[in-house]
Image (cartoon, helix red, strand yellow):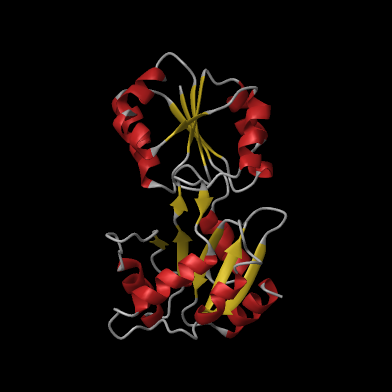
């Protein structure tokens, strides 16, 4: 049987059912590309399972998908996923492959950045437009489509949840100074941008953990939060049109 188990955002997000299935797994895998997994969380899983889960990359999972699913025909294969298992489209593909091979599959859900970020900001979930991701830039790779989506959302009065890339090579999440720099550079080529240097953004750090922090800052001043937020896993919200109650809730969340 194949299990897709959500890890949530912190060690206390794992349910008793999830821990039971992890301990009984024949093959214990953990995907390492959709989100950053802190060392202390990886250590916690190892302690609970009595062994280290085998890390799998996107390439491992996509190219080896048929074999991974086939292994679950006569073994208990558990794939651990940061956040909620079905937020990333890759994991829906796993379910489809399991159905095609007639392999039983069970999903154990957990909190994700999508629900927690919106809830902790105090903003109305129904007013969020499409989510975007800011990737790391390189000399030959500087995608700007995320800025177009943010600007469209703002013009529609909608908020934008912004996910930040992970530096897998160095095992670290994108910093606020890197994110602010990429946004500012992308804005230079944007046509009639709705997002401005003085636009307010919400920065959410280490969501779901005891040291969680939510702060607001103008885009131009966000890089100044670098020291305060160093090493933390971040996501952003770019607000669109705020109602009175949303403004009040956001002020409470960041006070």
Residue 235 lies, in percent from the top left, at: 52, 62
Residue found 31% across the figure and 68% down from its top: 144
Residue found 40% across the figure and 79% down from its top: 154
Q: Is residue 126 above or below residue 65?
A: below
Rendering quarter of residue 221: bottom right
**Quadrant of the drawing holding the C terminus:** bottom right
Residue 55 lies, in percent from the top left, at: 48, 32
Rendering quarter of residue 65: top left
**Quadrant of the drawing holding the N terminus:** top left
Closer to us: 126 or 97: 97
Q: Is residue 208 above or below residue 180?
A: above
Residue found 46% across the figure and 65% down from its top: 162
Residue 185 lies, in percent from the top left, at: 37, 75
Residue sticking out furthest to the top: 74
Q: Is residue 232 above or below residue 248?
A: above
Rendering quarter of residue 135: bottom left
């Amino acid at each position: 049987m194949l299990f897709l188990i959500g890890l949530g955002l912190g060690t206390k997000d794992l349910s008793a059912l999830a821990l039971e299935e992890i301990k009984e797994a024949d093959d214990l895998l953990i995907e390492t590309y959709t989100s950053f997994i802190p060392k202390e969380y990886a250590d916690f899983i190892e302690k609970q399972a009595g062994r280290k889960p085998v890390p799998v990359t996107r390439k491992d999972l996509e190219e080896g998908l048929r074999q991974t699913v086939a292994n679950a025909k006569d073994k208990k294969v558990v794939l651990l996923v940061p956040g909620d298992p079905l937020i990333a489209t890759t994991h829906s593909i796993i379910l489809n492959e399991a159905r095609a091979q007639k392999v039983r599959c069970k999903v154990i859900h957990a909190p994700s950045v999508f629900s927690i970020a919106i809830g902790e900001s105090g903003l109305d979930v129904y007013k969020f437009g499409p989510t975007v991701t800011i990737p790391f830039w390189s000399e030959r790779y500087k995608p700007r489509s995320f800025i177009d989506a943010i600007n469209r959302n703002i013009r529609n009065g909608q908020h934008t949840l912004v996910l930040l890339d992970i530096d897998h090579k160095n095992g670290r999440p994108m910093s606020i100074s890197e994110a602010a720099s990429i946004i500012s550079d992308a804005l230079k080529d944007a046509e009639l941008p709705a997002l401005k240097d003085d636009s307010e953004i919400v920065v959410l750090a280490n969501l779901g953990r005891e040291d969680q922090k939510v702060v607001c800052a103008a885009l131009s001043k966000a890089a100044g939060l670098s020291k305060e937020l160093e090493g933390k896993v971040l996501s952003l919200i770019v607000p669109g049109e705020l109602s009175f109650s949303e403004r009040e809730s956001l002020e409470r969340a960041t006070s």
